[in-house]
């Protein structure tokens, strides 16, 4: 499968690579409409987040074909990962590059970086999203379309349970 550059910081293969898929002999090759959904997710959510954050956004799971989604625990069969509308990520670390999320504070922890990203997605006007879920070590975010985006904010409670939180309550989570 050829790679496709979606935006300055994201390419197709970051969203299709899966150690689990390889282990199980699953190809995980997206259809063209899935590729276009991934492109929109990058353009409207992930790239604006990357720019605001000024730190690497590391995709741990993007597109999941049905065979792959079936063997991954934390999402149902209706998962937006099946459509290329969702990605899971954590925030890496590099020398600050002057993104708007960088306030000069040195060496935030992985959790602090994740919370910074979580708050930016909620508040930054350049970032749109459909559903945002905060997990202890990563964030799940999806993008549908400007008309369909629901702006749901949830916090994973463990045991497959989620708590829906308001925008204000979400901003106070740390
Ligand atoms: Zn996810």
Image: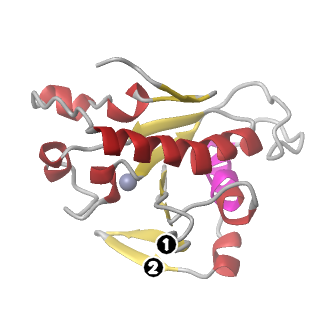
Do the numbered discs 1 and 2 sit on residues whose CB atoms are within 8 Å? Answer: yes
Could you give the CA–CA distance between mark 1 and mark 2, rounded to whole angstroms? 5 Å
Of 145 and 73, the residue lying toward us: 145
Q: Disc 1 beta carbon < 8 A from ligand 1?
A: no
In the rendered image, residue 83 lying in the magenta stretch gets the answer no
Q: Position of residue 167 (x, y in %)?
A: 66, 77
Magenta residues span: 109-119
Give above or below for 12 relative to 49: above
Q: Which residue is drawn at 80% across and 30% down?
A: 96
Q: Where is residue 87 in the image (x, y as percent from the top left)?
A: 43, 48
Colour scheme in use: secondary structure
**59 lies left or right of 22:** right
**103 lies left or right of 4:** right
- SS class, disc 2: strand
Of 76 and 37, the residue lying toward us: 37
Residue at label 1?
154
The quarter of the image holding the C terminus is bottom right
The residue lying furthest to the top in this view is 2
Residue at label 2?
163
């Amino acid at each position: 499968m050829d790679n496709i550059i979606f935006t300055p910081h994201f390419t197709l293969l970051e969203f299709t690579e899966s150690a689990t898929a390889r282990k199980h002999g699953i190809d995980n090759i997206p259809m063209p409409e899935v590729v276009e959904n991934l492109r929109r997710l990058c353009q409207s959510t992930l790239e604006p987040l990357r720019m605001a954050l000024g730190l690497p956004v590391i995709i741990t799971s993007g597109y999941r074909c049905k065979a792959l989604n079936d063997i991954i625990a934390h999402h149902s069969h209706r998962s937006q990962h099946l459509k290329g509308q969702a990605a899971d990520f954590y925030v890496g670390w590099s020398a600050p590059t002057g993104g708007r999320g960088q306030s000069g504070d040195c060496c935030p922890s992985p959790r602090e970086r994740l919370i910074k990203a979580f708050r930016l997605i909620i508040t930054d006007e350049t970032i749109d999203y459909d559903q945002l879920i905060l997990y202890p070590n990563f964030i799940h975010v999806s993008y549908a379309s400007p008309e369909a985006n629901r702006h749901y904010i949830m916090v994973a409670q463990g045991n497959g349970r989620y708590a829906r939180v308001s925008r204000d309550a979400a901003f106070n989570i740390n």
